[in-house]
Image: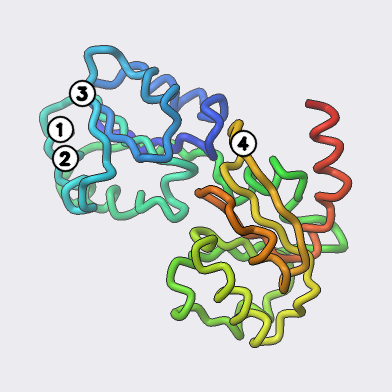
Amino acid sequence: MSVALVGAGPGDPGLITVRGLELLRACDVLVYDRLVAAELVAEAPASALRIARDRLEQEEVNALLVAHGRRGRRVVRLKGGDPFLFGRGGEEALALAGAGVPFEIVPGVSSLTAAPAAAGIPVTHRGSASAVTAFAAHDVEALDAAALARVPGTLVAFMGLARLARLVERLVTAGKPASTPSAVVAAATTDRQRVVSAPLGALPAAARGLPTPALVVIGEVASFRAELGAMRRSAA
């Protein structure tokens, strides 16, 4: 494959897949996101062209992948988490397909499950949650808060820390009980990981000062952190 869209995992460089690391170590060109661990960027060959995506528009990234792919170079597009979950991997895959450039998709360990797990929170649990709803919360006003408030099971909000107070306000106003167990997991699986737990109504105050990236978990499963989070710390 000339281009590989590779998921780097949730933060800890050790959580990249075997296939992802294999491709990374053999690439000619590496295009990587800001959230990718420096240890993974260093795994690319010394001769590889390294391109940080941060200052580029998505259309520029698409064009880079197509251009290098057409030249027959082994290109790795390294993204945090999984490329197809809030990673714009679909847009890049469509650009490559439209240009006739061969590509491979290498799924990554998603923070959807990994971040809560690292905090001792199972996103599903028999008797507590049989469904998980993930949503992007950077545009809180555009959310269907009433629909989210009615969803059974676990809610997981990506990119919601900056507008957490407004997110909580909208959910509670729409009928989600303020007493719902909740948590924020910041910088999950890294040595900067921080976790706070609180009833939904008190979560914004509890989460002040947390670093990004952060995931918001809302639902009965968040209450398991009290026991499982402590067990994880003891084991470590």
Q: Amino acid at mark 3?
A: Leu
7 lies left or right of 92: right
- Mark 1 or 4: in front is 4
Q: Which mark is residue 68?
A: 1
Per the model, the C-alpha gap separating discs 4 and 3 is 28 Å
Q: Residue at x 70, y 58 (%)?
A: 183
Ranked by sequence position, the earlier of labels 3 and 2 is 3
Q: Are marks 1 and 4 in contact (CB under 8 Å)?
A: no
Which residue corresponds to mark 4? 189
**Front-lying residue, 203 or 229:** 203
Q: Where 146 falls versus 148 (above or below)?
A: below
Query: Distance between the Cα atoms at labels 1 and 2?
Result: 6 Å
Q: Are marks 3 and 2 in contact (CB under 8 Å)?
A: no
CB under 8 Å between discs 2 and 4:
no
Q: Which quadrant holds the C terminus?
A: top right
Q: Residues within 10 Å of mark 4 (few under 14, many from 20)?
A: many
- Which residue is found at the position 41% from the left and 26% from the top? 38
Amino acid residing under circle 2 = Leu
Q: Is residue 183 above or below residue 14?
A: below
Residue located beneath label 3 in the image: 49
Q: Which structural element holds mark 3? A: strand
Labels 1 & 2 near each other (Cβ < 8 A): yes
Please provide percent x and percent y for residue 71.
Answer: 11, 29
Tag shown at residue 64:
2
